[in-house]
Amino acid sequence: MKTILRAALLAVTFLSAGAANADTLTLEEAIRQSVANSPLGAAATARVEVLGAARAAADTKPAATIDGAVENIGTNGFNQFQIDATYNQRIERGGKRAARVALAEGDIGVAQAQGLIARLDLAQKVQQLYVEVQAATLDLELARSRVEIAEALQKDVQRRVDDARDPLFAGTRARTQLAEAKVDLELAEHAVEAAKARLALLTGQADKEFAVVTDAFLDFAPAGTVPDDLASIDLALYEARSRRADANIRLQAANARTDPTVFAGPRFLGTGDVALVGGFSLPLSNRALNQANRDRAEAEKRQIEADLAVERFERRRAIGFAVERVEEAGHEAEAIRTKVVPGAEQTLREVLAGYKRGGFTFLDVSTAQNALHDARVRMVDAMTEYHRAKAELDRLTGRFAELVGGN
C-alpha cells in the first residue's frame, strides 16, 4: 500500500524538476535557431540591398547630354552651313536630390520593419510549438505516474483477490485500468515525439532527441497591465511608412520647381570660322499637375496616420485581451495546484488507508486515483493556456525583437 501511495504522489516531483538531458533546448535558443534556419533573413537582406541600390541611384545628379546639329545647307553652295555641338546639363532646384534620397531611405525603413515583423511572427510560432512540447512532456510524466499507480494497485488488488478478500471482477477491473493507463502512456509518448518533430521543422534540429525546459512551466507570473506607451514593432512599421510619406511630400514639393538646362559648345561655319554658342532653357511648370501630386502625397500621409491610430486602438485592445487571458488561465492553474490537487492527494491517501483496513472498495480507490490524475491534467491544461496567451502577449509587445535581430 505504501508503494501505491508513493507512486500516486510521484507526479508532484515534475513540478520543480527541470530537464536533465544534456541536449536541453531553451526557448531563446529555439527561436535563435529558427531564425537562422529560415530564409526570411536572406530575403529581407536581399530586399534591403535592392533598395540600397535604388538609394544610390537616387543620390546622383541628372545625366548630361551632347547634342549636334547641322544648319544652313543650301542648294547654291555649302559655304554657309553651320555645325553645332553642345554640352547640356540640367540643374536640379528645390532639393530634389535630397528628397529622392530621403524617399529611398523611407523605403528601406519600411522593408526593415516588415522583415522584423516576419521574424517576430516566426518567433511566435516557435514559442507556441515550444509550449506544446512542454505540455506534452508534462502530460507524459503524468501518464507514467498513472501507469505506476495502476501497476502497484493491480498487484495489491490481485493479492486481495487471491486471498478472497476482493471479488474477481476487482482484479479484472484493475487489469483493465492498467491497460488503459498503458495506452494513454503510448499516446502521450507519441504526442511528445510529434510535438518535437513540429518544433524541429522550424529549428532545423537534425536530432529530435532533445529536451525542453519544464521547471518553470507551472510558475504563474502576473502579466501586469496594458502599457501606456505601445512601442511595438507593428506600430514601428506604420511610423516608417509615415516617414516615407513625409519624404514623398517633400519630393513632390521639390518637383514643383522647374529645372533649367544650360548648354554650351562650338559652332563650325562653312567659311572655316569657329564660334562659341551657349544658352539655357527653362520648362514651364504644370501647376495643376504639381498641386495634384502634392495633394495625393498629403492624402497618403493622412491615411497612414489614420491607419496608425486604428492600429494603436486595436493593439491596446488586443494586449488587454491577452493580459486577461494570461491572468485568467494563470489564476485557474494556481487555484487548482493550491486547492484542488492537495485535496485530491489527501483523499487518495485516506481512501488507500481505508482500503487497507477494508473500509473502502477498489472502485473507491480507482475513483480517488482518477480524480487526482484529472486535477493534475486540468492544472497542466490551464498552464498550457496560460503560456499560449503569454506567447500572444509576447508577440503583441515585441518581447523577442532584439533576439530576432531588432534594433
Image (spheres, rainbow, N blue to C red):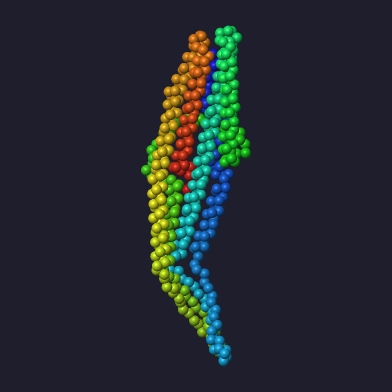
Q: Position of residue 329 (x, y in %)?
A: 44, 32
- Between 225 and 305, the residue placed more toward the observer is 305
Furthest-bottom residue in view?
76
Q: How many marks?
A: 0
Q: Position of residue 47 (x, y in %)?
A: 54, 54
Decide: is 136 above or below 371.
below
Which quadrant holds the N terminus? Answer: top right
Residue 152 visible in the current orientation = no
Furthest-front residue in view?
169
Q: Position of residue 355 (x, y in %)?
A: 51, 12
Q: Position of residue 50 (x, y in %)?
A: 54, 57
Furthest-top residue in view?
164
Q: Quadrant of residue 299?
A: bottom left
Q: Is residue 254 left or right of residue 367?
A: left
**Residue drawn at the location 57% of the way across and 31% of the way down:** 191
Decide: is 24 above or below 185.
below
**Residue drawn at the location 55% of the way across and 88% of the way down:** 74
Residue 315 visible in the current orientation = yes
Furthest-right residue in view?
206
**Residue drawn at the location 46% of the way across and 33% of the way down:** 386
**Residue drawn at the location 48% of the way across and 19% of the way down:** 345
Q: Quadrant of residue 336?
A: top left
